Amino acid sequence: MTSLITTLDPRSRAASRGWSDTTIRNVFVIPTVAFLIIFNVFPLLYSLGFSFTDFRASSKAQVNLVGFKNYVDVLADPVIWRTFTTTLWYVIVSVTGQFVVGFGLALLLNRPLPYKGLLTTLLMLPMMLSPVVVGLFWKLIYDPSWGILNHALGLGRVAWLSDANLALYAVAITDIWMWSPFVMLLSLAGLSAVPKHLYEAASIDRAGKLYTFFRITLPLVAPILLIAVIFRTMEAFKTFDIAFVMTGQPAAELISSRLYKMAFQQWQTGPSSALAYIILIMVLCITNIYVKYLNKAKER
Amino acid sequence: MRKTIAGLLAGASLMTIGAISAQAQELTILWAEWDPANYLQELVNEYQAETGVAVTVETVPWPDFQTKAFTEFNAQGSAYDLVVGDSQWLGAGSLNGHYVDLTEFINANNLAEVMAPATMQYYSEYPGGSGTYWSVPLEGDALGWTYRKDWFEDPAEMEAFKAKYGYDLGVPQDFKQLIDIAEFFHRPDENRYGAAIYSQNQGDAIVMGVENSVFAYGGSFGDYESFQVTGLLNSPESIEALEDYRKLFTFGPPGWGNSFFAEVNTAVAQGQVAMGMNFFAFFPALVNEATNPHAANMGFFANPPGPRGDDFAALGGQGISLVSYSQNQEEAMKFLEWFIKEETQERWAELGGYTAHGAILESEKFRTATPFNEAFFQTMFKVRDFWALPEYAELLTEAADAFYPYVVNGEGDAKTTLDTLATTWVDTLQAAGYPAQ
Amino acid sequence: MAVVSTRAGRLGNRIAIAAVIVVTLIFLSPIYWITSTAFKPLVLATSVPPTVVFEPSITPFVKLFTKRAQLTTPVDPAVYEAAPWWEKLVLDGGERLSRDGRGEVVFSAYPDRFANSLIIAVTSTLLAVSLGTITAYGFSRFRVKGEADLLFFILSTRMLPPVVVAIPMFLMYRAVGLNDTHIGLIILYTAFNVSFAVWLMKGFIDEIPKEYEEAALVDGYTRMQAFFKIVLPEAATGIAATAVFCFITAWNEYAFALILSNRRAQTAPPFIPSQVGTGLQDWTVIAAGTVLFLLPVAIFTFLLRNHLLRGMSFGAIRK
C-alpha cells in the first residue's frame, strides 16, 4: 500500500505523526465510494435486469425474458428517434446559451463593482426556484392572451409554446434563464483565481486584450468551466419538469418526457429500462469526451 | 458544526419514530388536489367529530395523481387506506389486486339500486356486466358546457346570427349548431373567441374532449366487450366527430395547444370565449363572483346530441375504493358504511360534492341548487367512458399522441389519424393478450 | 481583475457596469412577475391584458397557510361580519375556510412541509459537502488505484434519468423502512449531491498548490492539521459554491419527494404547485408559496456571497 503514496516518504517525520497518509486517504475516499456503490447498485441492477424482460411494474403477470427485444424495439421506434434528435438539439441550444450568457456575465462581473455580492445573489435567483414552478410561471408568462411577455415586448399574439417551430426554443430560453447563473458563478470563482501577476506581466508585455484572454484567462478558467458544462449537459439531457409542464408539442418532446410516459403512465417497465440504459450510455459517451478535454485542460 | 449535524439527525429520527407510533384510529384517503377533495376533507372532519377517527384526505397535483397512486399500489404500499380513483383505473385496480372486492358490501346495502346506474356501471363494476363491484361511487362527473348568456341574448347578435345561419341563436340543440355558434362568436380582432376545449396531450385531456364528440356523433372507441376496434374507432361517424373537434379547436383562443380544465376556466372567466367545455366539478368557480367577473352571465348546458341524434357525454368522476394493502381495512369499511348513508350523501352534496346517490340527484332541491346542477343531472344519464382495461393508460397515451398533431397542428387528416390509431390499438391490445381486431 | 488604470479601461468598466445592470434587470423581471402575482387578487393574475399596476393584498399568503374550499353559495352576512379580518380576505376571494370536527380553522400543510424541507435540505447539504470535500481531497492529493475510473463512476451516478430509478428506489426504501422518512430523503439527496460535490471540490482543491501543505508538514503540522488549517480555508470559495448548489438542488427536488414521501416527510416542492387543481388555477397562492420558499435559499446565498466571490488567495507564494 505504501507504494501508492508519492507525496511523502512514509518514513518521514511528518507521516509518522497522527494518521498515516494511507489511513487518511482510505478514510476520505472509501466511505463516499462505498456509499455510492451501495446506494446505486440496486436501482442499476434492477433496471438492467428488467430491461431484458417484458416486466410491467403494474402487473402481476409472469415475467418473461425477452433478450434484446426491448432494446431493438426502442431503437426501431421513430418516436423515440424524434425525441432523441430533439433532445440533442435542445442540449446544444440550451447549454451553449447558458455558457455564453453565464461566462459573459462572469467576465462583466469580474471587476471591482459596488454591491457585487448583492448583484450576484440577485442574478442567482432564477436557479433557486423549483423547476416545476419555473415551468408553470413561464407558461403563464408566455401565454398569448394573459402572458406578460408578448404584452411587454409588443409582440402581438405569438403562441410561443403552442407553435411547433417555437416551442423547443421557448423552453430552452427558460432553461438558459434558469441555469446561466450556475455557469456564471463557477466561471466567476475560476476567474477570480487567476493570479493577478499574470495579467500584470501581460500588460507589461503590452499584450493585446484578446491575446491575454485566450492565452491567460481561458486556459486557467477552462477546468472549472468544463465542470460546469459537464453538469449542465448531463442535466439538460435529463430535462423533464420544465418541458413537461410547459408544452405538449411533439416537436418539443424530450427523451425524458417520453421515458416518463413509458415508465409511469404506461407502466412498460421493461422497455423503459432499456431506453434508460440507452440514454445512460449516450450520456456516458458524451461526458467521457468532456472529461478527456478536462484532463487535457488541466495538464496545461 | 458536528453538533449541529448530530442534533439535526437526532431530531429527524425522533420525528420518524413519533410518526410511526401515532397510527391508530387514523384513515388516509388519496385523491387529486381539487375543489371536491377540499369538500371531502370537510365532510370527513364531521366523521371525526362523530367517531373520533381522524380521516385525512391527502392530495396530489392532478398530473402526478396516477403516478403517485400506482407507484404505491405496484409496490403494495400501505400508506393509503382508501383511494378515490379514476374510472379507468378499475381494470388495473381489480385485476392486479390493488382494490378490495366490495361486491358483498354493495349488494348488502343495495347500492346498485341506490346509486345512479351509470355511476355503478363505470365507477364500480368490473368487468362490465359481471356484477362484481370494486368501489362506492363518490364523485359523479362528466363533461358539460358553459356559455355566455349575455352574448347569446344580445338582440344585435341574435339578429346577425339568424341572418347568417337561418335559425335562432340559443343553447345549441346539436353539435353542428354548437360549431356554428363557435364560428359566429370567433372574432380574434375583438379578442373574442368561439369555444375553449381541451387540447393537452398529457394525461387524458385531449382524449376526453375528442371522446365527448365521438360519442355524440354515434362513433365509438371500440367495443369494450368483443375488443372490436377496426371499423368502430375509424368509422365515418368517428372521423366526422374528430374533424369537427379540430374545427372547434380552431375557434379557440390563440396558443390553445396545451389546455385543460384550468385554461378553459381562465378563458371563460377572462371573458374571452362564448362557450367552454369542462368537467362539471370545475364549474363552481365560474358562478363565484369573486373568481369570475362574469359569474352572473354564465349559463350551462349538457353535451348536445350529434347530427344523427345520438346523445352521449364523456364521463369523468371517481369511486372510492378500499386499498387491499391497507392495514386499517376494518376501520375503512366502517367509514364506507357511514359514507353511503343518505344523510351523509345529502351533506356531501350540500358541501359541494357531486353525489352519485340517485334519489338525491333527482330531487328538486339538488337540481335547482346551482345553475349547473340541472345540466349535470341530465348528463349523468347519458355518459360513456373510455376503456377501463389495466392497459388503458397505453391506449390513452397512444390516442393523445395520435390526436394532438391533427387537432392542434392540423397535420394530416382525420381519417388517416384514426386509421393509424386503430392499427396501433389493435397491436397494443393483441400484445396484451386480447382478441382485438 | 482586468487592468483599469487607463482611460479606455475606465470607460470599459462603465460599459460593463451598465451591461450588468441591464442583464440583472432582465433576469429579475420573471421573478418580479412571480412576486407581484403573490400579491394580486386571483382575477388579476390572468387578466387580459396582463395587469401591471394593482393594489397589493396579502390574501394569497392567508390562503397559503389555510385549508379552504370553493364557496358554492354566497356567504351568510352574519357569518361574514363575525369573521376575523383574515377570514374576511378569504371569503372575499370566494372561498370558505375548512374547519375540523371541533370547528377550529384547519391550517394547510405548508408550514410542516417547509420545516421538512429545511431539515432535509440543510442536513443533506452538510453531509454532501463534507463527504465531497474530504473525498475530493483524497483524490487530489493521494494516489488512488483506478482514480480516473472511480471518479467517472462517481460522476455517472448522476447520469441515469431519475424517472427510471424511482421505482427500484421506492421498492428499496420500502424494504428497509425508509419510505416517508426524513432520513430517507436526506440519504437520497446526499447521494445525489455528493457526486457533484466531489467533482466541484476536486476542481478547486487541485488549484491549491501542494507546496502549502508541504511547507506546513515541514513546520510540524500533521497531515490532518494541514488539511483543516491550510486546505479548508483556501478552499472556502469552492465549499461555499458547492454548498449553495447542493442546497438548491435538495431544496427544490420534486420527483422523489413526491414518490418516496407522503405527508410525514414530504417537502414543500410537491405541495406548492398542488394548488393547480382548483376550478381556477390559483396562481396567487402558488406565487406566494414560491416567494416564501425562495427566501431561505436567497438568504443562504447572500450570507455566503463574500466567500463565493473571494476567490482563492495565492498570497504566500506570490509575495
Image (cartoon, coloured by chain):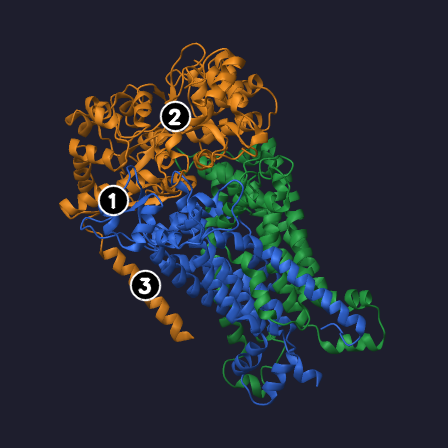
Chain colours: A green, B orange, C blue
Sequence-wise, which precedes: disc 2 or disc 3? Answer: 3
Q: Which mark is residue B144?
A: 2
Which quadrant holds the N terminus of chain B?
Answer: bottom left
Residue C191 is situated, as x and y percent measured from the top left of the image, at: 47, 59
- Residue B156 to residue B23: above or below: above
Q: Are marks 1 and 2 in contact (CB under 8 Å)?
A: no
Circle 2 SS class: strand
Separation of residues labelled 2 and 3 (CA atoms): 50 Å
Residue C213 is situated, as x and y percent measured from the top left of the image, at: 60, 82
Q: Disc 1 vs disc 2: which is toward the camera?
A: 1
Q: Which mark is residue B13?
A: 3
Q: Chain of mark 2?
A: B
Return the residue found at the far bottom.
C219
Circle 1 SS class: helix
Circle 3 SS class: helix
Left or right: where does residue A15 sit relative to residue B74?
right
Q: As rendered, which of A12 and C47 lies closer to the eye? A: C47
Separation of residues labelled 1 and 2 (CA atoms): 32 Å
Q: Which mark is residue C77?
A: 1
Which quadrant holds residue C205? Answer: bottom right
- The crowd level at tag 3 (other Cα within 10 Å; few <14, some 14-19, many 20+) is some
